[in-house]
Image: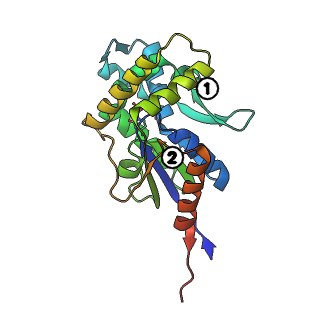
């Protein structure tokens, strides 16, 4: 039996652990990994640092003119984990903070920003052998992906996970209620926005991991991967 190289699209709600599982799978099967949420987060940080966003208002004309100045790259750290760089600066920690999290949905709703990100993502996946996670990977970026997973979990479970993560990183001021509010609000914005709202692709397989351990989840993913990459010999 022959193995073929495929494209893997992992979409779903925020804080479902998509990135963790996408990273694990990519490593396990020797594929490249791209965190597309990190790209929207990096653009958001750029806007914040360059006075292009004031409260909820974005200076879209100015941003359009400066899109070409935003260079997002990924580079592995000492432990081999991919980290996000904005114009050569490591912004991995900054883009995960509450400030960026609170604004990123606004930036991700802008059509020309999405078009530019999608173009870059399609270029990164041109040769297959890639795991990409986001919201529109199976629907817009790679509608022909051979493996599509739609990840979901209850808002409460997701908020708790995100809260534990922030605590582990030393954030002791954010409350669980604030995180839950942020998760719920992002769900609303992600699913109701006009530009590429979060939708399950008709051919995506749903993974609800509310009650799953990481090991169970990984096993589930690997099984699906095996199914999708094995070409059965013709009789
Ligand atoms: O996955 P994440 O929480 O890091 O994503 C951050 C934000 O970016 C989230 O509000 C949804 C948006 N996003 C998107 O619109 N399209 C993607 N492909 C990835 C993320």
**Which residue corresponds to mark 2?**
132
Quarter of the image with the C terminus in it: bottom right
Image color mode = rainbow
In depth, the one of 14 and 134 nearer the eye is 14
Image disc number at residue 186: none
Residues at discs 2 and 1 in contact (Cβ within 8 Å): no
Total numbered labels placed on residues in the image? 2
In depth, the one of 202 and 70 nearer the eye is 202
Depicted 73 relative to depicted 23: above or below: above
In depth, the one of 31 and 43 nearer the eye is 31
- Please tell me whether mark 1 sits on a helix, a strand or a loop: loop
**Which residue corresponds to mark 1?**
88
In depth, the one of 54 and 227 nearer the eye is 227
Instruction: Single out the residue that lies furthest toward the bottom.
Output: 235
Instruction: Give x and y (percent) for residue 40.
Output: 44, 31
Instruction: Give x and y (percent) for residue 96.
Output: 52, 24
Taking the image as drawn, is residue 117 in sight? Answer: yes
Q: Quadrant of residue 214?
A: top right
């Amino acid at each position: 039996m022959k193995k073929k190289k495929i494209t893997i699209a992992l979409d779903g709600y925020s804080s479902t652990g998509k990135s963790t599982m996408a990273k694990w799978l990519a490593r396990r099967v020797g594929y490249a990994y791209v965190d597309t949420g990190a790209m929207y987060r990096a653009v958001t940080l750029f806007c914040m640092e360059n006075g292009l966003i004031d409260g909820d208002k974005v200076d879209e004309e100015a941003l359009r003119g400066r899109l070409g100045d935003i260079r997002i790259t990924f580079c592995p750290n000492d432990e081999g984990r991919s980290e996000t760089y904005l114009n050569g600066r490591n912004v991995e920690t900054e883009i995960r903070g509450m400030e960026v999290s609170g604004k990123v949905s606004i930036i991700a709703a802008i059509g020309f920003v999405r078009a530019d990100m999608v173009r870059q993502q399609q270029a990164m996946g041109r040769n297959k052998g890639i795991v990409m996670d986001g919201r529109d990977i199976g629907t817009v970026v790679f509608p022909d992906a051979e493996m599509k997973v739609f990840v979901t979990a209850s808002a409460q479970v997701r908020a708790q996970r995100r809260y534990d993560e922030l605590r582990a990183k030393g954030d002791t001021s954010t409350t669980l209620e604030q995180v839950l509010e942020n998760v719920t609000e992002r769900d609303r914005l992600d699913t109701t926005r006009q530009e590429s709202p979060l939708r399950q692709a008709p051919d995506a397989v749903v993974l609800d991991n509310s009650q799953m351990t990481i090991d169970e989840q990984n096993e589930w993913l690997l099984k699906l991967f095996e199914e999708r990459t094995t070409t059965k010999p013709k009789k």
